[in-house]
Structure formats: structure tokens, C-alpha cells
Image (cartoon, rainbow, N blue to C red):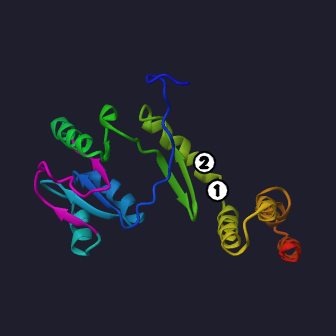
Amino acid sequence: MASPDTATDFPVCLRLRGKRVLLIGAGNIAEGRALQLLETGARLRMIAPQATETLRRLATEGRLELLERPYARGDLDGQALVFVATDDRRVSEAVAEEARALGIWLNAADEPDLCDFTLPSVGRRGAITVAVSTSGQAPALARALRQRLVEQISLHHVQLARLSGWLRERLPRGPARGRLLRLLVEDDIGGQLARGQRRAAWARLRAELEALGEQRP
């Protein structure tokens, strides 16, 4: 068992659609955070004395709520998650203190000792997300590794992910479905698709689906 000093982060992918998320700060770093959060469908509120033009435009379009004023105690009420992106350590500490009291998880940019969770370097291609974390120790290295990994994701992989999701929604759970989904990514159906042998791949997939149908009670 790892000691508190050597414990590693536990990686998760949060589903924030419809969740109330607060972001304190509205500079360039906060803008990047905001754009990522909006992609998730979160209900985003931002608080900062000043905001970038992009953030003001997004607020005008109704995509986020922007309060151009300093943070005040009580701002965290009703929030599911809190982010701080400010260069004022005192503000970050005050927000962290309130978050701890309310039991709300917090991430503070460039303040790893105040964080309940860290943000990996993320790249997306369709349904595929690549995230590289160094537990907040080397963000530049995480970005470099993420770029290399994303370059390995081709349109073929994106299509396989989409096809796999389609099959998972329509086929009954069980070993037979698991076997078919593995064939999509192993050097079988997936290999045929990768080599451009689409007709052979689809013929094999149809045969597997027919066999799966025959196994149903």
C-alpha cells in the first residue's frame, strides 16, 4: 500500500453535462479551462474582476454566466465542482478553504498543494480521449507526450470506436458480445478494416452478428 507521500492520482473521466461548475478567474488560463468545460455541457459560472473578450462574448451568447467582480465567500454554494485560475495565491487559498468546508472538490491552477484533483493534458479525436498526467509535476512533459499519442490515433480508430458504441447499444450483454467487441480491435475484423479490406470485414461482422442472434433464447 502506498504511503500518503507516494500515493498516485486516481484517473477518472467526469461527466459534467448539466452540472453546476464554478470557475474563478477569467484570464487566458481560465479561458482555456472554460472552453474545455463548455465542451462537456457543464453549466458554467465564472467570477473575476475582468474577463477576456472571448469570455464576454460567450457570456453574451448565453453559453456561460459571467460575474465581473471579485470572489466573495458564499460563491461556492450549490456548485458541484470548482476551478481557480488566478495569479493571487490569497484568493486561491480562500476559495480552497471554503471548498473544504463545503466538501466541494477543487482544482487551483499552478497550486498543486491546494488541489483535490489535477488536470491531465488532454487530446481528443472523436470519441477517443487521450489524457496524460504527471500529477501536476511536469505539465510541459505531459503536453509533449499527449501530442505524440494523439498523432497515433487515425480516422480508422475513430470509426472503430463509433462502431463499437453502436454495437454495445444494440447487443445483449454477455460473453458473446464481449468476444465480438474484441474482434473489432484485434487483428481480425479490426485488422481487415485497418488494411482497407472493408468488404471482408463487413462480411465477417455480419456472420458474427448472425451467429450471435442464433445464440439468443
> Mark 2 highlights which residue?
149
* Residue 170 colored in magenta in the image: no
Residue 33's quadrant in the figure?
bottom left
Picture coordinates of residue 151, whole percent (x, y): 61, 52
* Residue 85 colored in magenta in the image: yes
Q: State the separation of the CA atoms marked 1 and 2.
A: 7 Å
| Residue at figure coordinates x 78%, y 58% from the top left | 182
**Pointer 2 local density, CA inside 10 Å: few below 14, some 14–19, many at least 20:** some
Tell me the element at label 1.
Answer: loop
Q: Quadrant of the C terminus?
A: bottom right
Q: Is residue 193 left or right of residue 1?
A: right
Q: Bounds of the magenta span?
A: 64-87
Tell me the element at label 2.
Answer: helix
**Quick check: 198 above or below 1?**
below
Picture coordinates of residue 75, whole percent (x, y): 17, 54
Residue 47's quadrant in the figure?
bottom left
**Pointer 1 local density, CA inside 10 Å: few below 14, some 14–19, many at least 20:** some
Give the overall secondary structure of the magenta segment: loop
Q: Quadrant of the N terminus?
A: top right
> Mark 1 highlights which residue?
153
Circles 1 and 2: CB atoms closer than 8 Å? yes
The count of marks equals 2
**Quick check: 49 above or below 88?**
below
Picture coordinates of residue 116, whole percent (x, y): 36, 39
Picture coordinates of residue 41, whole percent (x, y): 39, 67
Q: Is residue 166 left or right of residue 212?
A: left
